[in-house]
Amino acid sequence: MVNDGRWLGWIDRKGNLIPCEFGKHVTCLERLAMTEVMAEKEGWVKVTVEHDSHKYKYIGMKRFSEDQVHALTDLGFTEVDVNILSSF
């Protein structure tokens, strides 16, 4: 699974991209008056990068919506499976 766009942030259930800088996922949500727990309960997908391998990955706590799958594939992730909630 690849993310060649080097994009980080959140994807809401409608597939809207909410960008953030590396290590700023929580700060990004605070600007929206949300917490990470709230975003996870809402079914948002987190797109981040591993420190050591620099591999881009996505994490979700609910089955992905069709819009989220489209957003992930648009970002360059391949073989997105709505039943697998993480790419690592």
Image: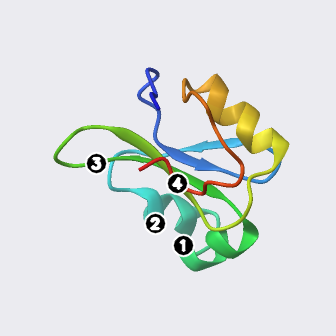
The percent coordinates of residue 56 (x first, y second) are 39, 38
In front: 26, or 15? 15
Q: Residue furthest left?
A: 52
The percent coordinates of residue 32 (x first, y second) are 64, 64
Which residue bears the numbered disc 4? 86
Residue at the image point whose x is 20% and y is 40% from the top: 53
Can residue 33 be seen from the camera position used here? no
The percent coordinates of residue 4 (x first, y second) are 43, 21
Q: Is residue 22 above or below residue 85?
A: above
**Label pair 1/2, CB-CB below 8 angstroms:** yes
Q: Which mark is residue 50?
A: 3
In this rendering, would 29 be left or right of 26? right
Badge 2 amino acid: Val
**Label pair 3/1, CB-CB below 8 angstroms:** no
Badge 1 density bin: few <14, some 14–19, many ≥20, Cα 10 Å: some
Which residue bears the numbered disc 2? 26
Q: Is residue 88 above or below residue 33?
A: above
Q: Mark 2 to mark 3: distance in Å?
A: 16 Å
Badge 4 density bin: few <14, some 14–19, many ≥20, Cα 10 Å: some
Residue at the image point whose x is 16% and y is 46% from the top: 52
* Label 2 element class: helix
**Label pair 2/4, CB-CB below 8 angstroms:** no
**Label pair 1/4, CB-CB below 8 angstroms:** no
Q: Is tag 2's residue or tag 3's residue first in the polypeptide sequence?
A: 2
Q: Which mark is residue 36?
A: 1
Badge 4 amino acid: Ser
Q: Mark 3 to mark 4: distance in Å?
A: 13 Å
In terms of image quadrants, where is residue 84? bottom right
